[in-house]
Amino acid sequence: MKEDCAKEPFLLVNPDFSEGDRGWHGIPFTAASSGVAEFYDKTFDTYQLLENMPAGTYCLRAQGFYRFGGIREAYAAHNNGSERLPAMMSLNDDVCSFMSLFDESAPYTYGPYTYPDNVRGAHSAFNNDGAYGANEVECTLDARGDLRVGLVKTERVLYDWNCFDNFRLYYVGRPDAIREVKDEDAVCVDVYTAGGVKVRTAVHPAKAVEGLPHGIYIVGKRKVAVM
């Protein structure tokens, strides 16, 4: 698999939006500036298409949040249980909703209001505070084929806001190795580069390659590609 991965164009184009909207197709972002991208008060279907990808399971992760309308209305909805999260990221037909702006894991307050309220604030939340990172979706290709990496929202919500950054695509493994990978999830592993250099010791598999540079790594008994 290592040789196969080396030949494939795994890297997403412009995954951190440092080059505006380059590489992304479909509905244009409301803005792609300050190192993040956003949609405001609109529906969208925006994507990159990776062609002829090897069979296996892929995991897409990103930092991002969704505000369900204007600030006051969205905060009330979050607290009274009526909040909805229609902004999603997708891998082919598999989707997950972006986190709420007011997710309890975020280190911000409503009074005084310190939640992100523009792209500069979002950039700081993502890249300085490390917030809003629990956005993840997986997709399995049973055979070699295309992988559509996207963002989608089909419902119009007045004054809503979806902001995101730092997309990362990981190759988990072959379809016949998925059960083995899941069975090992609770066991801490060491992480090595493809050249055999240990870079992490006794870490949980789910966090094993977070933050590592692009490349191929040996995580326990499996190979993982960081895109």
Image: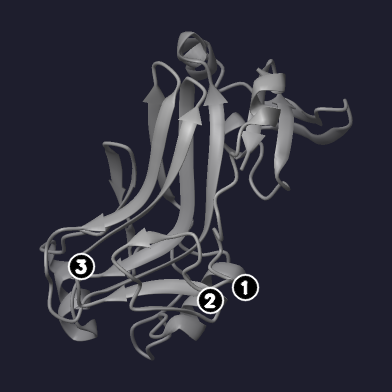
State which tag comes first along the sequence, 2 or 1. 2
Identify the residue at horizontal 44%, vertical 77% (top origin).
108
How far apart are the two marked residues, 3 and 2, measured between alpha carbons? 23 Å
Relative to 171, is 132 above or below? below
Q: How many marks?
A: 3
Image quadrant assignment for residue 184: top right
Q: Which residue is mark 2?
A: 123
Please tell me the numbered disc located at residue 71.
none
- Amino acid type indicated by mark 1: Asn
Image quadrant assignment for residue 198: top right
Residue at the extreme bottom: 112
Q: Which residue is mark 3?
A: 78
Front residue of 81/194: it is 194
Q: Position of residue 101 (x, y in %)?
A: 34, 69
Q: Secondary structure at mark 2?
A: helix
Identify the residue at horizontal 62%, vertical 73% (top origin).
128
Q: Position of residue 27 (x, y in %)?
A: 28, 66
State which tag comes first along the sequence, 1 or 3. 3
Pointer 1 and pointer 3: residues touching (CB < 8 Å)?
no
Rendered-image quadrant of the C terminus: top right
- Amino acid type indicated by mark 2: His
Rendered-image quadrant of the N terminus: top right
Q: Which residue is mark 1?
A: 128
Residue 33 falls left or right of residue 187: left
Q: Secondary structure at mark 1?
A: loop
Pointer 2 and pointer 1: residues touching (CB < 8 Å)?
yes
